[in-house]
Amino acid sequence: MRVTVLGGGVIGLSVAWYAARAGYRVVVVDHGSPHGGSWVAGGMLAPITEAWPGDEDVLALGVESLELWPEFARALGVALSPVGTLAVAVDRADVEVLDQLCAYLGRMGRSASKVTGRELRALEPGLGPVRSGLSVPGDVAVDNRALLRALREACAGNGVVFASDTASDTASDTAPESGSESDVTVIAAGAWSRDLHPALRDVIRPVKGEILRLSARPGALPPPRHTIRAQVSGRPVYLVPREGGFVLGATQYEAGFDGDVTVGGVRDLLRDAEVVWPGIAEYGLAEVAAGFRAGSPDNAPVIDWLEPGVLAATGHHRNGLLLAPVTARRVLTLLREGGNSR
């Protein structure tokens, strides 16, 4: 069977890799946007600290996918962070938010350990005046760009053919032609998926996020060992370690496909991060970027047949990297079953 995957982010490449290993002839069509969610992502694999009441299906799917990640990473030769996540609170209101999360996780049979501010600073001496937090050792992280490179190499090594689409801002111009030459087309173009099939038009939307990459300068405190997720006066901010620095994110806007990084977004991220990690002022600002997550009405992905010969694997919102292995596995199951309807 010939399979065309529309989208060359982590979801599209994971689907292509799984399908090619299973013996399908695979072509990946990608428009190479610098605003793709996979390229701009923080790299957190964190279903527990992302959990919230009402998103039980997303939590269950995230936990299922996280269990697949160690083997997924080993097969690709990418490293997972050796330590987990610390969720920290700065003021009393932020403590209440984390207490709600902890109580919810307990009801859902998921565990997170409460830690005091003193215990947090013993784990991460660079933390500022945080009140308390949660320790979640199972919520880990991966270098998103190393993952993209590894997936592309794995796809190429299994015979996947790559076709660029640089003629437009979306893959829609090439979708009809690519689909007509294939037995199955898999729409995995993230936020741009909405333009590739009528069934996705009112389901998938772009959710803008801004992210900064910071590099340690001589004399600066070393970056955190853990991923740090914080609430600062109700605003979420995270710091994800990278070699020689960390990724700082992320704002979230309903702004369509506006690819500009705003002054306000950078200001807010740096201001809140400095509260959590005061030594940030000594770091270099290596990169600022904006990307588009693929939002859906219920925050859950769409992984299903849309019509005979057309599958969707999109709508992963904040969990695209986390859900890559479970998405690829489900798409492969659908291909093998051969059902061409919902």
Image (cartoon, rainbow, N blue to C red):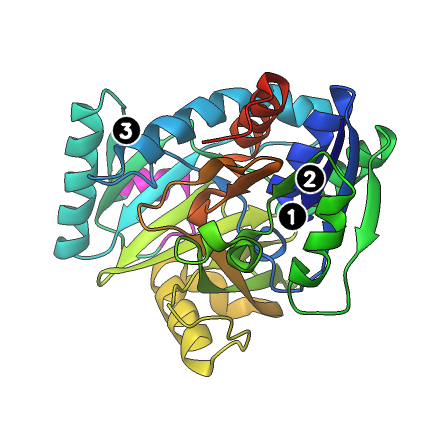
Q: Residues within 10 Å of mark 3 (few under 14, many from 20)?
A: many
Residue 296, position as x, y percentages in the image: 38, 50
Instruction: State the residue position of label 3.
Output: 112
Q: Quadrant of the C terminus?
A: top left
* Helix, strand or loop status at disc 1: loop
Q: Which residues are magenta?
A: 118-127
Q: Residues within 10 Å of mark 1 (few under 14, many from 20)?
A: many
Marks 1 and 2 in Cβ contact (< 8 Å): yes
Q: Amino acid at mark 3?
A: Ala
Task: Write the residue at 43% across / 40% down.
Answer: 301
Query: Which tag is nearer the camera, tag 3 or tag 2?
Result: 2
Instruction: State the residue position of label 1.
Output: 9
First in sequence, mark 3 or 2: give its number: 2
Instruction: State the residue position of label 2.
Output: 13
**Distance in Å between CA atoms under marks 1 and 2:** 6 Å
* Helix, strand or loop status at disc 3: loop
Residue 139, position as x, y percentages in the image: 43, 32
Q: Amino acid at mark 1?
A: Gly
> Residue 291, which numbered label?
none
